[in-house]
Image (tube, rainbow, N blue to C red):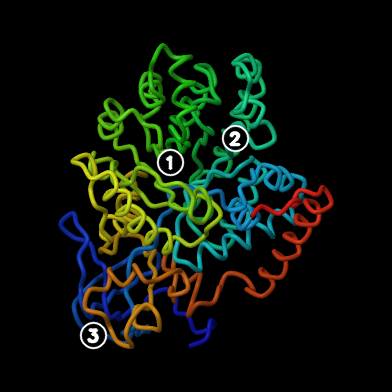
Amino acid sequence: MTVASAPSGQYIIEAGWVLAYNAGASHLLAGGSVRIEDDRIAEISAGRMPGDLPRISVPGQLLMPGLISGHTHVASGTPTRGIIEGGRSFSRPIKLMDRLSDEELDDLTAFNLAEILKAGCTTQVEMSLSLRQAESYARVAGVWGARGFPGGMIPGTSRLDAIWFRDDDQALFDSVPDTLAEIEANFEFGQKLMGDFDGRLMPMMAPHATDTHTDETMSAIIAAANTLGTGIQIHLSQRETETEAVRKLQNGLSPTQWLDKLGGFEGPFLGAHMKALDWSTDPAILKRHGAVFAHCPSAGGAGGATQPYPEALAAGIATNIAIDTHSNDLIENIKLAVLGGRVRARLLDGPAVKLPTIWDAVDGATVVAADGLRRPDLGRICAGAKADFITVDLSDWLVGAGTLPPEPLNNLLYANGGMVRHVAVDGRFLVYDRQLTTANEGDVFERGAVVHRKLWKQLSDEQWFTPTPR
């Protein structure tokens, strides 16, 4: 089939396996058929459905919900890939991105979003590293048909380092007026964009972290989030210094306790990393409010530091698997979450950890994230849900055995985003037979390459790459 033959409107998909959802849980259906009507899943059945609707037959593939990343920085994925692994701070490349023209920034965003979609992630909870990057994300994702919950990080990248890496807290207090201005600008962005593109873009407020805010600025963010109604995305207790800084300023409260005191959990809440939670107090608060831990296996680049995934599962915290940045492959990150989490659990070896399973990770990247966003119409293959779905080839070289596997989720542990064949949002194919349908894939690739070469040249002229880390 060619890209031009991708069906639309009403059609049926016949898959080797379907990861369906009913009675409050995901389950596997062999030889299932799914009927799509416009933007919704209309019917699921075992075996072939009658009728003369257009059909897509994928007998060696798994049909599953579109993946949801609870934490992304879309535009910065590829400019930092292969750099963070050298041990350098990637702050400089990120700052150079804000010098790009709108057209160049959109080309960079498009390159990264193309990778993200081709690897099966249909929904991004997008903490753009500046308001300009959030605006770029909205321009590209909106036209392409992706589903997103975008917000500009506050403080944005141009102001962040002086506040985050401050020598004393006066720098934090002095930053308040400018931070309040950023909050207002991002709130206005959210109000203007809310529900655009047939409701696929639903902006959120995105504070950087708890240690870069005061009572005044965080309260302003919470008020804005409550007005928008879509909640908050944040880096939460991402390192020990954050937790220590908040305890110092907030009479011993952990970041989670402080946010709870301010009313920060009234709407959807997704917190990334959580390496430095207070495990004696914080899990109960997060669970009570339905907050989601966005676990990012590639947050430190390939082979970066681990995160408390087994501990969060054992504590009953709703846990998503997320892209963050550097890697745009959510299938790969699902695999890494399970493999790295199992190593971490075995090393910790105690009652406070749970050995992660592929079911934990897949549910985390689908239904768990959807429930945290308070969107029961996402993250599941069931009648009435949005027709956001992907198919993954599990019978091909390296991932399968030339035929349909008997336990298909386990084969995802041998997969990556290259095995994704079809990707749809609202029933519209954004990727069909591995090819991007929303834009000319070759043009997206070449235009992105031009921007990357410009960034590398600027860094090279500054001798940023010298000496080469070993």
Disc 3: CA contacts within 10 A as few (<14), some (14-19) or many (>=20):
few
Q: Which residue is mark 3?
A: 50
| Residue 169 left/right relative to 267 | right
Type of the residue with mark 3: Pro
SS at mark 2 in the image: helix
**Mark number for residue 159?**
none
Type of the residue with mark 2: Asn
| Residue 407 left/right relative to 86 | left
Disc 1: CA contacts within 10 A as few (<14), some (14-19) or many (>=20):
many
- Residue 396 vertical position relative to residue 78 in the rendered view, above or below: below
Q: Which residue is mark 1?
A: 273
Disc 2: CA contacts within 10 A as few (<14), some (14-19) or many (>=20):
many
Q: Residue at x 71, y 48 (%)?
A: 97
Residues at marks 1 and 3 touching, judged by CB atoms closer than 8 Å: no
Answer with the quarter of the image where residue 419 lies.
bottom left
SS at mark 1 in the image: strand
Q: Earlier in the sequence, mark 1 or mark 3?
A: 3
Q: Nearer the viewer, mark 1 or mark 3?
A: 1
The residue nearer to you, when weighing 270 against 181, is: 270
How far apart are the two marked residues, 2 and 1, measured between alpha carbons? Answer: 23 Å
**Mark number for residue 186?**
2
Residue 414 screen position, x and y as percent: 36, 71
Q: Residue at x 70, y 35 (%)?
A: 158
How far apart are the two marked residues, 1 and 3, measured between alpha carbons? Answer: 47 Å
Residues at marks 3 and 2 touching, judged by CB atoms closer than 8 Å: no
How far apart are the two marked residues, 3 and 2, measured between alpha carbons? Answer: 50 Å
Q: Earlier in the sequence, mark 2 or mark 1?
A: 2
SS at mark 3 in the image: loop
